[in-house]
Amino acid sequence: MSKKALITGITGMVGSHLADYILDNTDWEIYGVCRWRSPMDNVEHLLDKVNKKDRVYFEYADLNDQISLITVMQKVKPDYIFHLAAQSYPKTSFDSPIDTLNTNILGTCRLLEAVRATADCDPIIHVCASSEVFGRVKKEKLPINEECTFHPASPYAISKVGTDLLGRYYAEAYGMTVMTTRMFTHTGPRRGDVFAESTFAKQIAMIEKGLIPPIVKTGNLESLRTYADVRDAVRAYFLLVTQNPIAGEYYNIGGTYTCMVRDMLDTLLSFSPMKDQITVETDPERLRPIDADLQVPDCSKFKKHTGWEPEISFETTMLDLLNYWRDRVNKGEVFLTR
């Protein structure tokens, strides 16, 4: 009988790419947890399979509704759970701290309690925290390893500290096979337009189409980031749960290409035939009150355990992201200019 994988947040960038990877590389059945109002843009290519009940199924639940999570768990009884759903935008968390903390911390707790409440259900669980838990790291601590002190720099980051600790707690207290990841910056096609590299790519695509003036509006360009491709990230998540999973373990995962946000923008601009006509302008509304400005990972622990290595180059990731937005703009879609 085929294994069952439950993906919370399947309609997000990472969840949709993880579904693609599982479909291409296993015979597993995929149960995607989503809210009734979740946008379907990222999973549009899967809807035919959903409609035909061909290996992909959508289950409606909400991290803020305990009963819905228990209902899904008792129905599916998955072999694997990838917990990716979250309020995932750091800047929004400054305006909506309570919603962020509730969804990410208590939502994770509700999910793990739903597993505990379900008889004959003992899945291997991936709890997705974030590199944002490390927050404001001193230069001498780079690259950041798993034992680096947490110094979260946003309500989102604080919520992910809670998520991280909950995953380890449930492994230690209840013998559940839960592992936690701190994924560093990862991007690619389907990245939400509120994130820096994706809003830059969207603005460039809209400029090329003549929809907005030739000005790319930015936030802080001085942050140092290490970039990974989302397609490498989901392969890492798959290896996490299939290569000798160790309950209670926690891993940094990230790419190998490190640069300033300014350099990332320059790379995107280099792909545009209008690069010499485009100017860059700081938008105060895009600045966070406080920023995690040094995000460079030491991923040796995870690589040693699984053999995972990133395969997709930074330039390929950026070009694919830009072409993703060009395709959407060329289709005539209308976007907020954010």
Image: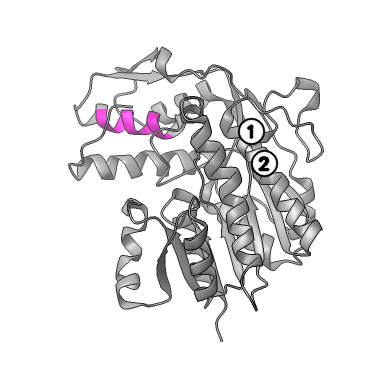
Foreground residue among 152 and 287: 152
Front position in the image: 320 or 191: 191
Magenta includes 253? no
Q: Quadrant of residue 290?
A: top right
The span picked out in magenta is 198-206
Q: Is residue 204 left or right of residue 197?
A: left
- Callout 2–callout 1 Cβ contact below 8 Å: yes
Q: Residue at x 53, y 46 (%)?
A: 229
Report the residue that reaches farthest toward the bottom.
1
Residue at the image point whose x is 45% and y is 38% from the top: 318
Q: The N terminus lies in which quarter of the figure? A: bottom right
**Mark linked to residue 242:** none
The secondary structure that dominates the magenta segment is helix
Residue, disc 1: 158
Q: Position of residue 18 (x, y in %)?
A: 51, 59
Q: Position of residue 286 (x, y in %)?
A: 43, 20
Compared to 169, does 105 lie above or below?
above
Height in image: 244 above or below 207? Answer: below
Q: Which mark is residue 162?
A: 2
Q: The disc labelled 1 sits on which kind of residue?
A: Ile
Q: Residue 312 location, x and y as percent?
A: 55, 48
